[in-house]
Image (tube, rainbow, N blue to C red):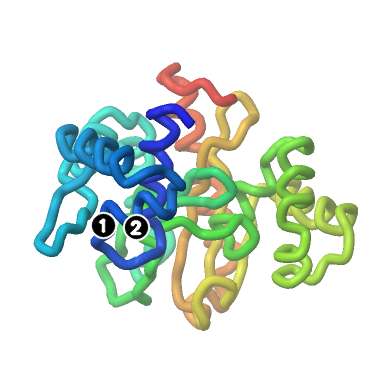
Amino acid sequence: MGLASRILQVMGLFRGRPWPLTVEEIAQETGVSQSSAYRDVQELCRAGFLDPVIGAGYVLGPAFIEYDRLLRQGDTLIPIASRVMHELLDQTTQRATAILCRRYRDTVMCVHQEHGTAPHPITTYERGVAMPLFAGASSKVVLAHLDDRSLKRIYLDNEDTIRARLGHGDWKAFKAEVRAIRRDGVVETVSEVAEGRAGIAAPVLVNKQVIAGVSLVLAADDIAGASLAFRAAVIEAGKRISEEIAGGGTWVAR
């Protein structure tokens, strides 16, 4: 395994487990000698991606904060979406959170959110939080706009999970459901991510390919009687973001 691959493997160890990690733990998990693991760790420390702490362990370092700032500064999607999301809350309800999500591997990750000014349900779907592609409006609207080849691969890789979450027995039924979402241009879910929460999501498209999804998350009780109006507003928000991104010529969807 090359140095770059080992470094990425070390970074991956910090997902979903307690920090700090010791060189011994890193060596064991990556299958290299302790001397090789130590050299990798020192390389990461020099670059600011790891920091040593008391007890001979290591945690993620400040370089990630710097790069997150650079990402926010250079991302043309978020400034456009942020303005539209504020207007979405004005047009619908301030008792909600507007969320912008992008696909990240086989998950959907929140990259930005705007909170309403009135009391609204707390959402754990904050920047950097990834959710499975099969639960919640934010995820399903991105899933529904993937090409058939990507969709089939995701289905085959996650068939048991899809059957358990969605109750589908085969690829044909799964494809029919997500294509219905694509046809409608919007999806509404209730209590799929958190009990008592409703989500309405629409795609952000460039060159007919999905680059993000914009969602309105609110209490399920607050959607009663306003579902159609809220759906129309979310669809319009997705279209406006899509048009402004495409007009700027800075995004190339692949």
Q: Residue at x 84, y 53 (%)?
A: 176
Which one is in front, 224 or 201? 201
Please state which amino acid type lies under the numbered disc 2: Glu
Q: Residue 149: give x, y in percent of width and height.
A: 77, 36
- Callout 2: few (<14), some (14-19), or many (20+) C-alpha neighbours within 10 Å? some
Tag 1 residue = 22
* Horizontal side of residue 141 vs 159, given as left or right: left
Exactly how many numbered labels are in the figure?
2
Q: Is residue 174 above or below residue 148?
A: below
* Residue indicated by mark 2: 25
Q: State the separation of the CA atoms marked 2 and 1.
A: 5 Å
Question: Helix or strand or loop: what does disc 2 sit on?
Answer: helix
Q: Is residue 247 above or below residue 102?
A: above
Q: Quadrant of residue 78?
A: top left
Whether residue 46 is visible here, answered yes or no, is yes
Vertical order, 16 against 224 (above or below): above
Residue shown at the point (61%, 55%) measured from the top left: 133
Q: Position of residue 18 (x, y in %)?
A: 32, 67
User: Helix, strand or loop at disc 1?
Assistant: strand
Within-10-Å neighbours for mark 1: few <14, some 14–19, many 20+: some
Please report contact status of discs 2 and 1: CB closer than 8 Å, yes or no: yes
**Depth order, front residue of 248/172:** 172
Frontmost residue, 67 versus 231: 67
Q: Is 176 rendered above or below residue 251?
A: below
Q: Label 1 amino acid?
A: Thr
Asked whether residue 85 is in view, the answer is no
Where is residue 249? Give x, y as percent: 44, 17
| Quadrant assignment for the C terminus | top right
Residue drawn 49% across and 56% down? 215
Q: Position of residue 138 (x, y in %)?
A: 54, 56
Question: In the visual, does 48 lie left or right of 177?
Answer: left
